[in-house]
Image (spheres, rainbow, N blue to C red):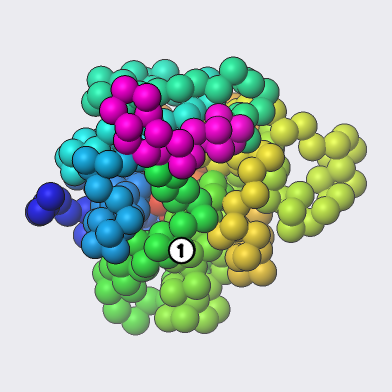
């Protein structure tokens, strides 16, 4: 099927006066992506078109199968449908009910894993049980897109970095890139390209204090030494980050380019979310607000620096 769908070319906006010490904050408005309102529009548009061109998938013969902690699921439900595919999503039960409902309304089959405590890792046995099998009703084959490890995903995110480089104020250096640490799609993948343009840029990722997955990968044992108890790895409210028990290829291979990791508590981001709405009119989800919180923290110790964070999605999806 030919399609004229588009994603990306989102705005880079400055949030004046939100950081101390004459630091400036810019945000990449990925919540403006036109299909499902997140950077995963870029990913699934690219994955589906490329796999079709390669002759690997066809709406007549394949069902697109995926697991996700939220935004990826919604993007695939929207874009898969536009390309004429059946979509099957295996999701952990503890993701925002609104996102699950929207996926169902779009006609995607949603299978919830029963293992609440295992979050995204609980979906894996179900995914692996379906992958490559055929649906009894129509003989279509389940094709696991596996965006978190798909070799085509980096190309999908290259324009994200290129747009930032093009739109960053001329003559200004990008000093701190502060993305959420999910599976690495929006953090380590673009950071490689951003560091090529801004060599002194530091990548400071963030995740939940309740599930410091990448923190433990990068600094084994440091959490316990610092906080005097072992990491908990529990479900949390920074949706899209810290998917414990899943081996995320991009993150594992990109650990060296992460310069620092900040941990955010469940109760910390809500005042920032309210501030973003009252001061700027931006209604963003918890993970986006947490990014701004982290830039505010770092900002206390530096001056005259330029920060970049990401607005991942809108609060209307929660
Ligand atoms: C709300 C939200 N924020 C941030 C992320 C992190 O994105 P990535 O998987 O690109 O690391 C996700 C990923 O699903 C998400 O759903």
Q: Is residue 218 above or below residue 36?
A: below
Which residue is at a point 60% across and 52% down the rendered structure image?
248
Is 125 inside the magenta-drawn segment? yes
Percent of width and height locating residue 281: 27, 36
At label 1, counting other C-alpha atoms closer than 10 Å, the crowd grade (few under 14, some 14-19, many 20 or more) is few
**Corner quadrant of residue 160:** bottom left
Q: Is residue 162 above or below residue 100?
A: below
Observer-nearest of 20 and 280: 280
Left-right relation of 187 to 263: left
Which residue is at a point 67% across and 39% down the rendered structure image?
244
**Residue 37 in view here:** no
**Corner quadrant of residue 288:** top left
Q: Is residue 289 above or below residue 146?
A: above
Q: Which residue is disc 1 drawn over?
A: 151
Which residue is at a point 63% across and 21% down the rendered structure image?
115
Percent of width and height locating residue 79: 24, 42
Q: Which residues are magenta?
A: 124-142
Percent of width and height locating residue 308: 43, 60
Is 32 inside the magenta-drawn segment? no
Left-right relation of 306 to 47: right
**Corner quadrant of residue 121:** top right
Judging from the image, what secondary structure is the residue with disc 1 in? Answer: loop
Which residue is at a point 57% across and 69% down the rendered structure image?
202
**Picture quarter with the C terminus:** top left
């Amino acid at each position: 099927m030919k399609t004229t769908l588009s994603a990306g070319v989102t705005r880079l906006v400055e949030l004046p006066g939100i950081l101390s010490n004459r630091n400036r904050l810019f945000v990449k408005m990925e919540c403006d992506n036109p299909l499902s309102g997140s950077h995963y529009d870029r990913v699934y548009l690219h994955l589906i078109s490329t796999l079709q061109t390669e002759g690997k998938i066809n709406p007549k013969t394949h069902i697109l199968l995926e697991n996700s902690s939220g935004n990826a699921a919604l993007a695939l439900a929207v874009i898969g449908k536009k390309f004429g595919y059946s979509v099957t999503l295996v999701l952990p039960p503890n993701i925002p009910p609104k996102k699950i409902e929207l996926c169902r309304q779009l006609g995607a089959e949603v299978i919830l894993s029963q293992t609440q405590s295992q979050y995204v890792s609980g979906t894996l046995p179900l995914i692996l049980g379906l992958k490559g099998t055929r649906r009894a009703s129509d003989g279509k084959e389940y094709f696991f897109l596996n965006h978190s490890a798909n070799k085509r995903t980096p190309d999908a995110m290259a324009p994200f970095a290129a747009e930032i480089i093009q739109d960053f104020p001329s003559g200004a250096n990008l000093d701190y890139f502060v993305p959420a640490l999910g599976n690495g799609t929006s953090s380590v993948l673009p950071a490689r390209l951003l560091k090529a343009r801004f060599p002194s840029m530091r990548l400071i990722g963030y995740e939940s204090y309740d599930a410091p997955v990448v923190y433990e990968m990068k600094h084994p044992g440091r959490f316990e030494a610092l906080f005097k108890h072992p990491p908990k790895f529990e479900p949390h409210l920074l949706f899209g980050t810290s998917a414990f028990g899943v081996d995320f290829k991009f993150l594992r291979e990109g650990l060296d380019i992460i310069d620092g990791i900040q941990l955010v508590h469940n109760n910390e981001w809500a005042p920032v979310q309210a501030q973003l709405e009252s001061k700027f009119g931006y209604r963003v989800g918890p993970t986006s607000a947490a990014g701004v919180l982290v830039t505010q923290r770092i900002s206390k110790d530096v001056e005259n620096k330029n920060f970049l964070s990401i607005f991942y999605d809108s609060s209307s999806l929660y």
